């Protein structure tokens, strides 16, 4: 009896190794180059604006994905954009990650990874080449950072993500504090409906006027819901809040921002669609002050029509208006022709 069990175990072990060997033999490593460019022409109708019009390339991405083994993929992406130092076309390392699909329900990524704060919102909005999603546009979060994240499929409708990252974004290295940002999200999808809750937190040392150090935590909250009523019409809304920060990477005690974004699209056919979006951003008033601390509080309106003549090419004619609350800042009013092409 004992010999029979030993034989059965050895046979099972042998068959397991054989299956793995066969799987590895059948797998062929492969790679693919990809790229994307955001180009525009705009005419500025703002009163007193000296530069009335301009051609621009706002972003150019160039990347490569390589499937190392089954369930294991390496990706690298360069982001060419404006540098704070003055260069309009500086290449940044946007992504350099290793992605491991541990099972059908678990996926882990590490390195310079894409973040999860507004990825679903950006996809639902659908016009990143025209305007960033709310969190990205107003500095509530970054699209990539150094760290590790894990994604979990809890059911057919429910998924979750968790991460630990540096917190400074992909254009900067870790700060002197050496403290990381941690966060998570929960996403529900069913029959055209999507709902998402996201939260993160990161502490940093702040020195007050008296020279005393204190740990202050900057945190972000994002609530998002969207619904595709049919192949023709989709509508979404989101609420976002940033606490103790003038930006996701700039801790400032008692400085808070919050806002909402509502956007919608109607699709006529595969080539033509119209879209619109409204943003509202506000901040708190600091103790002893009469006005809110953020000079760029206000609202934004984007509306236009998109034409997609062929696959991987999109263009849009649209209006973008920015109405600032502070009288010192003029209302911006611009007409855009945006183009995205990718491969």
Image: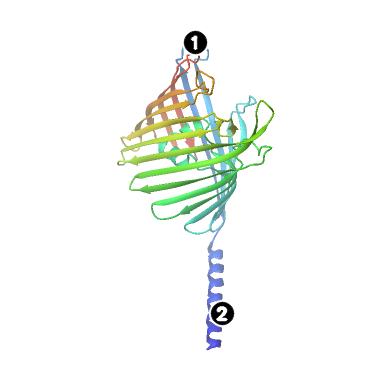
Q: How many marks?
A: 2
Q: Which mark is residue 113?
A: none
Q: From the viewer's perspective, is 341 left or right of 83?
A: left
Q: Could you tell me if the residues under marks 1 and 2 are in contact, i.e. CB atoms within 8 Å?
A: no
Q: Residue at label 2? A: 10
- Name the residue furthest top: 48
Mark 1 and mark 2 lie on one chain; the one further toward the N terminus is 2
Colour mapping: rainbow
Q: Residue at label 1? A: 48
Q: Secondary structure at mark 2?
A: helix
Report if residue 137 is visible in the image: yes
- In this view of the protein, which residue sits in the foreground, 221 or 263? 221
Q: From the viewer's perspective, is 303 left or right of 209?
A: left
Q: Position of residue 167 (x, y in %)?
A: 59, 39
Q: Position of residue 229 (x, y in %)?
A: 30, 41
Q: Residues within 10 Å of mark 2 (few under 14, many from 20)?
A: few
Q: CA distance from mark 1 to mark 2?
A: 83 Å
- In this view of the protein, which residue sits in the foreground, 328 or 303? 328
């Amino acid at each position: 009896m004992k010999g029979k069990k030993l034989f059965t175990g050895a046979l099972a072990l042998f068959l397991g190794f054989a299956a793995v060997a066969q799987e590895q033999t059948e797998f062929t490593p492969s790679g693919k180059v990809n790229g994307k460019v955001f180009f525009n022409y705009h005419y500025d109708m703002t009163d007193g604006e000296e530069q009335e019009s301009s051609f621009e390339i706002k972003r150019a991405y160039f990347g490569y994905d390589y499937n190392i083994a089954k369930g294991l993929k390496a990706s690298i992406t360069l982001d060419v954009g404006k540098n704070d130092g003055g260069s309009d076309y500086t290449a940044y390392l946007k992504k350099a990650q290793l992605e491991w699909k541990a099972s059908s329900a678990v996926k882990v990524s590490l390195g310079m990874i894409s973040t999860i704060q507004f990825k679903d919102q950006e996809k639902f909005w659908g016009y990143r080449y025209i305007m960033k999603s709310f969190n990205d546009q107003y500095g509530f979060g970054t699209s990539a950072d150094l760290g590790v994240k894990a994604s979990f499929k809890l059911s057919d409708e429910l998924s979750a993500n968790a991460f630990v990252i540096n917190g400074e974004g992909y254009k900067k290295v870790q700060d002197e504090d050496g403290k990381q940002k941690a966060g998570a999200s929960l996403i529900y999808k069913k029959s055209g409906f999507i709902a998402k809750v996201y939260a993160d937190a990161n502490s940093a040392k702040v020195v007050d006027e008296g020279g005393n150090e204190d740990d202050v935590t900057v945190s972000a909250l994002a609530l998002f819901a969207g619904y595709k009523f049919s192949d023709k019409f989709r509508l979404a809304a989101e609420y976002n809040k940033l606490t103790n920060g003038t930006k996701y990477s700039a801790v400032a005690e008692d400085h808070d921002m919050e806002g909402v974004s509502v956007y919608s699209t109607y699709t006529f056919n595969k080539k033509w669609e119209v879209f619109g979006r409204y943003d509202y951003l506000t901040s708190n008033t600091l103790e002893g002050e009469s006005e809110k601390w953020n000079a760029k509080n206000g609202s934004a309106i984007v509306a236009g029509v998109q034409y997609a003549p062929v696959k991987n090419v999109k263009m849009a004619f649209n209006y973008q208006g920015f109405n600032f609350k502070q009288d010192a800042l003029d209302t911006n009013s611009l007409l855009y022709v945006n183009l995205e092409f990718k491969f």
